[in-house]
Image (cartoon, rainbow, N blue to C red):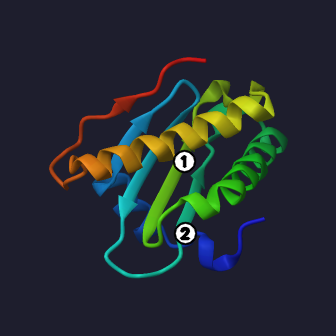
Amino acid sequence: MLAGTNRITSGSDYKMVVRRGVRVVGPHFVTYIRDNSEVQPPRFGFIVAKNVGNAVRRNRMRRRLKAACFGLLPTVHPGTDVVIRALPAAHELDWPVLQAEVGQALQSFQRRKAAGTTGAGHRRPERLPSP
């Protein structure tokens, strides 16, 4: 489970990542990733709306996303904020597919960061291949 220092808790932080972060679109998730200027541990936030399902499905999806991000925590650079928005079909995913899609989004951002295309004015979403 993610520690408190690895979670985005304030609404203003969510808005900052979603509005100014790089968007990576996958078949089941939209991931917003932003480098924070502060040196702090990587932080994750999750948006699971009612269109994903009832409360049981939404909470299960949130727990699965937290577990997937916990496993990827060592690969994320400090000072990175990540918000993952689950799309309606996400609740049907098998565990390996869920992990792979979240990992691909983070790798995509790190490749773009290395290439220098993650500037604030760069809002073109990258599309991940369908499984």
**What residue is pinned by disc 2?**
8
Quarter residue 92 falls in:
top right
Residue at (78, 52) in percent of width and height: 63
Q: Position of residue 96 (x, y in %)?
A: 76, 33
Q: Secondary structure at mark 2?
A: loop
Horizontal arrangement in the rendering, residue 25 relative to residue 126 (left or right): right
Q: Earlier in the sequence, mark 1 or mark 2?
A: 2
Q: Secondary structure at mark 1?
A: strand
Q: How many marks?
A: 2
Residue furthest to the left: 121
Q: Any mark on residue 50, and which?
A: none
**What residue is pinned by disc 1?**
84
Q: Nearer the viewer, residue 98 or 58?
A: 98
Name above or below for residue 110 compared with residue 45. Answer: above
Residue at (35, 32) in percent of width and height: 126
Q: Position of residue 84 (x, y in %)?
A: 54, 47
Horizontal arrangement in the rendering, residue 35 relative to residue 11 (left or right): left
